[in-house]
Amino acid sequence: MTEERTPNRWRRYNVWDDRSLANDRFAALDPAYGFAALASPHDPCASLTIEGGRVTVMDGVAEADFDMIDTFIARHHIDPAVAPEAMVIAPEAFARMMVDVAVPRAALVRLARGLTPARLAEIGRLLNVAELTFAQVKLRARRTPGNQAHVTNAKDDPLQMAADAATAALYGFDELETTVRVARNARTSALALTVGAAVACDGVLVQCSIEKAEELRPGLAGLTSYTETMSVYGSEPTFIDGDDTPWSKAFLTAAYATATAPRPWRA
């Protein structure tokens, strides 16, 4: 007679089984507390006013009230020659164009230069996960994907950090990130990471992921190519509290663009 055994099952498995995985979300929608991935009643309405070839109002915000992200978008993203054509396209129509194999990538890229952040958000929320994946593949701009390496050590040893950073750069990693065990070691770790990567190759991005306020100081001192958290946050007030936005990735994308060209090894 064989004894029937039940498999060992942790309680966490029951929690995982009860999650709404099929609904593409883990947290309950609660816009009042900022839990709104794609749509919130607090989102601004899309609008754009161009006067004399200059953006004067964008998504209900006047130029005088632009923060640094708004200014970046208005000056370096919005194309005054394309915007009048792009902004009159209904979000539903543009969303269909993104998943239409008959619409080439070049056409979408040209029209996107005339869309404001709020309009882009309106379009994005109309697509499900499968459609977003298709659009992402269709719109991919980088020919060769880049990989990130995490370079750290248990003792926050800067010499070991620099040596490991150089090794990772020689292995071809486009970006190196480090963290520290002791917060006051952040600056020496950031310096070691920067020096080690620069000794090996040109154009390697480096970052030191630490507490936000301290992270900003070595970043502004030039010890890292960019500070991880600060670079992707969406507006000036978020240097204090932090809040990510899809279009704030423009800064991070610009940083990545510097590493897309082939990097010669140092002799």
Image (cartoon, grey):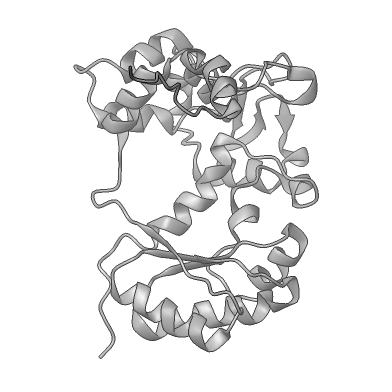
Does residue 172 appear anywhere in the picture? yes
Q: Position of residue 29 (x, y in %)?
A: 68, 16
Q: Is any atom of residue 195 visible in this view?
A: no
Residue at 65%, 41% (x, y): give it: 70
Q: Quadrant of the C terminus?
A: bottom left
- Picture residue at 79% right of the left edge, 24% below the top: 33
User: In the picture, residue 71 is in which quadrant?
Assistant: top right
Q: Is residue 206 left or right of residue 170?
A: right
Q: Quadrant of residue 183?
A: bottom right
Give how far across and how far down residue 112 sits, in percent.
42, 29
In percent of width and height, residue 41 lies at 72, 13
Question: Is the N terminus in the top left, top right, bottom left or bottom right quadrant?
Answer: top left
Q: Total marks drawn?
A: 0
At 77% from the left and 61% from the top, the residue drawn is: 213
Q: Measured along the vertical axis of the image, is residue 211 above or below residue 40?
A: below
- Vertical placement of residue 93 versus 14, above or below: above
